[in-house]
Image: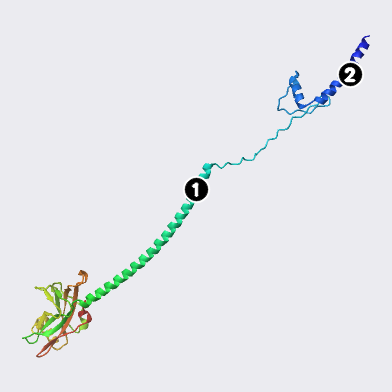
């Protein structure tokens, strides 16, 4: 009896089990599987949500579904930059400043070019003015030189005395001259070629006149008198005097006159005239004539 009852029960179970299996296959879904897994009391059924399910083996009675893959982009595209109104205002202000700066630079360059041209014109004008001033100065100096006094030396016989002579200084210029100093010297030499160059004077010989002498144009003044009787004293011995008488040696009188004019600048006021004379000794009469090298008859 018992085996019959057991066989009936197995058949009943088989009949009821077939519809339930079909229903389970048609309604099976990932959500149902997750729900069944959450309600399952088996420890093996509890799996983490992010765990990847493993495929079912042949001996497992149910079918497992895979979870959808999660896609992660390594370098997401940048979001488009928003240009705010503050940035727009700043950009416009910078553009205006750049334009104004460029315009200012161009104006400054133009102004510098004009200044450079004006400077060139000013330099040219200054050079022309300097040249004109130099020419005017030269003309003024030439005019002054043409109008300045010129002291010339001449020899005249002394009145009322025989064989006596006077060295005269005459103003041949156009303006007055003031004589500031005179000097004279006597020297015996074989010829004028043996005279020292430049002329040598004793320091004490150059002396100002006792009374100021101002010569107007055409006026003369004596600066050195000389007589025949003075020759022996200058020779110092009879032998030298005999040589003067025979013209083996010559007696020279030379000197200078320093004078100032009244129209030149202080630096150009002082002038000098050098003179030289040869004393000619004769048996009865003597003479005194202008002679000597050019250095002894110069004018400044």
| Residue on which the image places disc 1 | 94
**At 23% from the left edge and 76% from the top edge, which residue is drawn?**
143
Seen as rendered, the residue at the extreme left is: 160
Q: Determine if residue 38 is in view.
A: yes
Quarter of the picture holding the C terminus = bottom left
| Residue on which the image places disc 2 | 15
- Could you give the CA–CA distance between mark 2 and mark 1, rounded to whole angstroms? 90 Å
Q: Determine if residue 60 is in view.
A: no
**At 51% from the left edge and 47% from the top edge, which residue is drawn?**
92
Circle 2: is it few (<14), some (14-19), or many (20+) Cα within 10 Å? few
Above-or-below relation of 196 to 247: above
Above-or-below relation of 254 to 65: below
Circle 1: is it few (<14), some (14-19), or many (20+) Cα within 10 Å? few
Do the residues bearing badges 2 and 1 touch, measured as CB atoms within 8 Å? no
Above-or-below relation of 158 to 92: below
**At 82% from the left edge and 23% from the top edge, which residue is drawn?**
24
x, y percent for residue 10 = 90, 15
* Count of marks overlaid on the render: 2
Seen as rendered, the residue at the extreme top is: 1
Locate residue 217: give its quadrant: bottom left
x, y percent for residue 23 = 83, 23
x, y percent for residue 144 = 22, 75
Left or right: residue 181 versus residue 48 is left
Above-or-below relation of 257 to 13: below
Q: Secondary structure at mark 2?
A: helix
Q: Secondary structure at mark 1?
A: helix
Quarter of the picture holding the N terminus = top right
x, y percent for residue 80 = 61, 41
């Amino acid at each position: 009896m018992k085996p019959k009852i057991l066989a009936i029960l197995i058949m009943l179970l088989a009949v009821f089990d077939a519809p339930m299996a079909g229903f389970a296959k048609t309604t099976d879904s990932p959500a149902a599987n997750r729900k069944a897994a959450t309600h399952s009391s088996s420890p093996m059924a509890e799996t983490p949500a992010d765990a990847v399910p493993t495929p079912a083996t042949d001996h497992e009675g149910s079918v497992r579904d895979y979870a959808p893959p999660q896609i992660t982009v390594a370098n997401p595209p940048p979001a488009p930059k928003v240009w705010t109104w503050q940035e727009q205002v700043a950009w416009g202000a910078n553009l205006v400043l750049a334009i104004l700066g460029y315009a200012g630079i161009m104006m400054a360059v133009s102004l510098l070019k004009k200044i450079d041209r004006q400077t060139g014109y000013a330099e040219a004008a200054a050079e022309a003015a300097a040249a004109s001033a130099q020419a005017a100065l030269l003309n003024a100096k030439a005019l002054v030189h043409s109008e300045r006094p010129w002291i010339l030396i001449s020899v005249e016989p002394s009145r009322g005395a025989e064989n006596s002579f006077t060295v005269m200084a005459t103003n041949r210029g156009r303006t007055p001259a003031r004589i500031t100093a005179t000097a004279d010297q006597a020297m015996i030499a074989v010829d004028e070629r043996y005279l020292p160059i430049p002329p040598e004077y004793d320091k004490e010989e150059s002396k100002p006149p006792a009374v100021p002498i101002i010569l107007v144009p055409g006026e003369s003044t004596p600066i050195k008198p000389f007589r025949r009787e003075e020759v022996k004293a200058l020779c110092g011995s009879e032998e030298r005097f005999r040589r003067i008488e025979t013209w083996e040696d010559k007696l020279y009188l030379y000197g200078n006159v320093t004078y100032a004019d009244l129209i030149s600048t202080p630096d150009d006021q002082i002038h000098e005239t050098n003179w030289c004379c040869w004393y000619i000794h004769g048996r009865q009469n003597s003479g005194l004539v202008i002679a000597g090298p050019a250095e002894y008859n110069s004018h400044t």
